[in-house]
Amino acid sequence: MTAAADQPGKENHGIMSTTGESTPPLEVENLTKRFRQGNAVIEALKDVSLTVRRGEFVAVMGASGSGKSTLLHVIAGLTRPDRGRVLIDGQDLSAMPDRRLTLFRRRHVGLVFQAFNLIPTLSAQDNVLLPILADGHDADAEQRLEGLLARLELTQRRRHRPDALSGGEQQRVAIARAIIGDPSIILADEPTGSLDSVTGQSICRLLQELCKEQGRTTVVVTHEPAVAVWAERIVVLKDGQVLTEFSTEKFRDLHELAAHYQDVVGATPATEVQP
Ligand SMILES: Nc1ncnc2c1ncn2[C@@H]1O[C@H](COP(=O)(O)OP(=O)(O)OP(=O)(O)O)[C@@H](O)[C@H]1O
Ligand SMILES: [Mg+2]
């Protein structure tokens, strides 16, 4: 029996259906999420739907408060929606009790945050290994660790604790930790938000390369066009709803993309000009 066969839900990972179509790694259907604050109710997500193909790199953009992080948290199973559902590898998170959801998340979802969220007392290597240590040792872990550390240029830094690593190195450790368990999707919330722009761009390039080389499906949340431009597709949220989505292919450069983004989120609809 393979290690994958022991893992709940892993059996469907990338498997073709009987019709020959691969199950999308991520399907989001009609999500609605409300938060109550005193007497007020905030609708953070309103009827949001989204499908992401295997190996696709999608950016979710939108102004502050548009619902980006809420969407990512619901996709990750960290927050339960009020309505709608999330399917990862065809498996409905809403149907899972909490404990099963926690296990499922650990095996299917890799999370990367702005603040890196590394354990300060552990070395880079132990931080990377943390998610799979929780599941007991797996025979391939050592090999995967070596490969990942080399790929993410962390081999020389493996014994260092987070406070002895640069911001870019810390985020690379967080990315290695997110993918050590070979998740179906990587979810990143403002992954470059704590980095200078050059380091931020190198992290975006790395995420893009991991999508292309290893077929990693990635959803990045950002309000920065300079981050979103690395994705293949951009989904724009406004006031908790999908305003529009577009491919990045048609833009020649970042400037064009940023101008288009400003146009679509631009507050006021254009007034009609009489000829
Ligand atoms: N736990 C919560 N309790 C109450 N309201 C919340 C909670 N989490 C989010 N909200 C509200 O839901 C809306 C969407 O928040 P969210 O954090 O998803 O926005 P965002 O697009 O990620 O913003 P930012 O770019 O500032 O990170 C906001 O109005 C926010 O205040
Ligand atoms: Mg946010």
Image (tube, grey):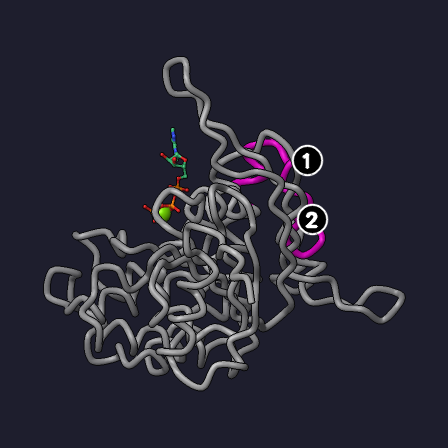
Dots 1, 2 in contact, CB < 8 A: yes
Q: Picture coordinates of residue 240 (x, y %)? A: 50, 42
Query: Would residue 96 be counted in the magenta stretch?
Result: yes
Q: Picture coordinates of residue 78 (x, y %)? A: 47, 39
Q: Picture coordinates of residue 86 (x, y %)? A: 63, 45
Which residue occupies the foreground of this view, 77 or 204? 204
Residue projecting furthest to the front: 275
Q: Residue at x 55, y 52 (%)?
A: 243
Q: Residue at x 48, y 60 (%)?
A: 264
Q: Which mark is residue 91?
A: 2
**Callout 1 secondary element:** helix
Q: Quadrant of the N terminus?
A: bottom right
Amino acid beneath label 1: Ala
Q: Residues within 10 Å of mark 2 (few under 14, many from 20)?
A: some
First to last magenta residue range: 87-103
Which residue occupies the foreground of this view, 258 or 72? 258
Horizontal arrangement in the rendering, residue 273 relative to residue 158 (left or right): right
Would you place residue 148 above or below residue 52 in this image? below
Q: In the image, is the residue at mark 1 within 8 Å of ligand 1 by its beta carbon?
A: no
Q: Picture coordinates of residue 41 (x, y %)? A: 46, 22
**Callout 2 secondary element:** strand
Would you place residue 227 above or below residue 214 in this image? above
What residue does disc 1 label? Answer: 95
| Cα separation between marks 1 and 2 | 8 Å
Q: Quadrant of residue 274?
A: bottom right
